[in-house]
Amino acid sequence: MGRRFLTAEDVRRLGGPAIAVDADTVVTPQALEAAASLGIQIQSAGAGSYSPPTPDRGPDAERALKTLSHLPEPGGAGSGDDRGVIVTVIGKNRSGVLAEITAHLAAADCNIHKVSQEIVEGYFHLILTVELGPGASFDSVKTDLEALGGPEDFVARAMHQRVFRFMHRI
Amino acid sequence: MAPFTDNEVLDLIRMVELETLDIRTTTLGINLLDCADPDLESTCEKIYAKVVHHASKLVETADSVAADYGVPIVNKRIAVTPAALVAGASGASNLVPIAKAMDAAAKEVGVDFIAGYSAYVHKGFTRADHALFESIPEALDVTDHVCASVSLASTKAGINMDATARFAQVVLDTANRTADRGGLGACKLVCFANAVEDNPFVAGAHIGIGEAETVLSVGVSGPGVVRGALSRLSPDDDLNTVAEVIKATAFKITRMGELVGRETARRLGTVFGIVDVSLAPTPAVGDSVSDILELIGVDITGAPGTTAALALLTDAIKKGGLMASSSVGGLSGAFIPVSEDQGMIDAVRKDALSLAKLEAMTTVCSVGLDMVALPGDISVDTLMGVIADELAIGMVNSKTTACRLIPVPGLSAGETVEWGGLLGTGIVQDPGRYGCASLFRRGGRIPAPIQGYRN
């Protein structure tokens, strides 16, 4: 473990035309200022000019990557829940809502697995279980759907299926 | 893909859209022990650099997870190693520059609070602890985002009454320094018995010395969701049913918290710490713990039966949370911050909720006397007595208790102060006419109770 920080005090003490720091050393803003005003160059390990290192989150950090290992994704990464989206639409009943929504989903390369719709006293709710195709991204589908309808018409939402699985399945 | 029933889907949509389900806070804990330096100015530089270095992506990452999962993350915060531990090496007698460095870093990365201007003094003071105590009033006056906390007691150590007396004076000084803002400084100052090292909720958040380099924890909330679930029960359902409904609801919101917490940690590249499952009310309508107690069956919060109802609530939340996640930590239970809960504000206004009843409630809630306004002219020994009583409850019952008391300058019992925002409305409570000057004068330590000797 090398020097963790380089402070303005360090810069003044070390002096010289250049100060070399380890790749993981954080140079404080005050040290950069002091170096600039004294004409000292701060160099990272590769003799280049200093650029801030990526944060070192410590020896435990690799656990972060295995963070959900006790709750594995069904079918592994890249399939199953990763591609599952639940679309809900709630609003006043009128003709053509289902067609409008499904047309958007088809255009976005989404495959609908399940459709459920009910109408109660002039209002409807529609729930679609959707699988994103290889060409679809969750963000664009979500933004697309949420732009449809309106406060006087209907509200459409898209959520990752994973959220529902976490909440409702043990 | 496993199919979900319509009810399951609509359940979640209702929670988010109508019952204000949210992740109350994602808190990044950052260890600052390696920032210790013989020179205070260098210590401050390192603290600023390290916090900014590790937290610069926190807000952006939390927002991206919130957008992806459709659950709002209300606050992004930072908890750091107790400042007194970091400052010790400098030998400085005024630690305000550290608070300023923390504040500047919080502003730079855009979080709403940075907590950990703290000291552990449940058994005694170091020079640095003493310096930190002395500097708290100024530090909380001149900064916007810094929160301070001190540990004054534990089941293992007893109550450090010298520190408690000194702390009471610090609370008064802090409130007086911020008199123009209704004593706002004291809203950012808390003391603990049995302080927890992984608490993500401010004002008491800090990262203990047993924690990793950086660790991301979340606090989930959701009084509105529990209230919604209980309001669908029939008045004839018995208390077992009530407990079951609360447990099932707590399970769901904890799972949500763990998902969001783990994903945020993964994207930041840091370890996931804990989910704190606490019902944390806000002044918003419906987001009230008091409403839940009333739905369980008391006329108004503070009426006889309130402590029993709160005991049921706190326990059921813990059980649901523990089933949902192996990483439950922090304070986990129900918070009763008086000024932040519209139902409690109303109860105080109607004279239903006294300071004595609040103290009784804290024996079964998860924190303590939280956001309680007191008269500005309260004597230091009376204030110490209120705090010591609360610490004694924590010490004897092996639980965390805390005090966040605000002596509002210029106001007396029954008067109202508006702190605004999440801090809400304080109605000054009456601590009674009698004090404990003799107890104050004695000083020393209340020895650890027999429960502390479990080896």
Image (cartoon, coloured by chain):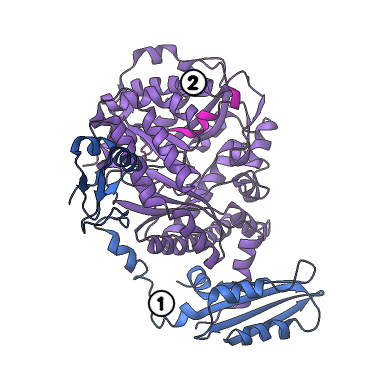
- Amino acid residing under circle 2: Leu
- Amino acid residing under circle 1: Glu
Provide residue B442's location: percent of width, then percent of height. 34, 13
Q: Is residue A145 magenta?
A: no
Pointer 1: what residue? A73
Of B347 and B360, the residue lying toward us: B347
Mark 2 Cα-neighbour bin, 10 Å: few <14, some 14–19, many ≥20:
many
Q: Is residue B320 visible?
A: no
Residue A24 falls left or right of residue A87: left
Q: Residue at x 43, y 47 (%)?
A: B200
Callouts 2 and 1 close, C-beta under 8 Å: no
Q: Is residue B281 visible?
A: yes
Q: Which hue is chain A drawn in?
A: blue
Q: Which hue is chain B drawn in?
A: purple
Question: Residue B107's mark?
Answer: none
Q: Is residue B186 magenta?
A: yes
Provide residue B259's location: percent of width, then percent of height. 45, 64
Residue B335 falls left or right of residue B329: right
Q: Which quadrant of the structure image shows residue B325?
A: bottom left
Tag 2 and tag 1 share a subunit: no
Secondary structure at badge 2 equals helix
Question: Residue B172's mark?
Answer: 2
Q: Which residues are magenta?
A: B180-199
Residue B419 falls left or right of residue B322: right
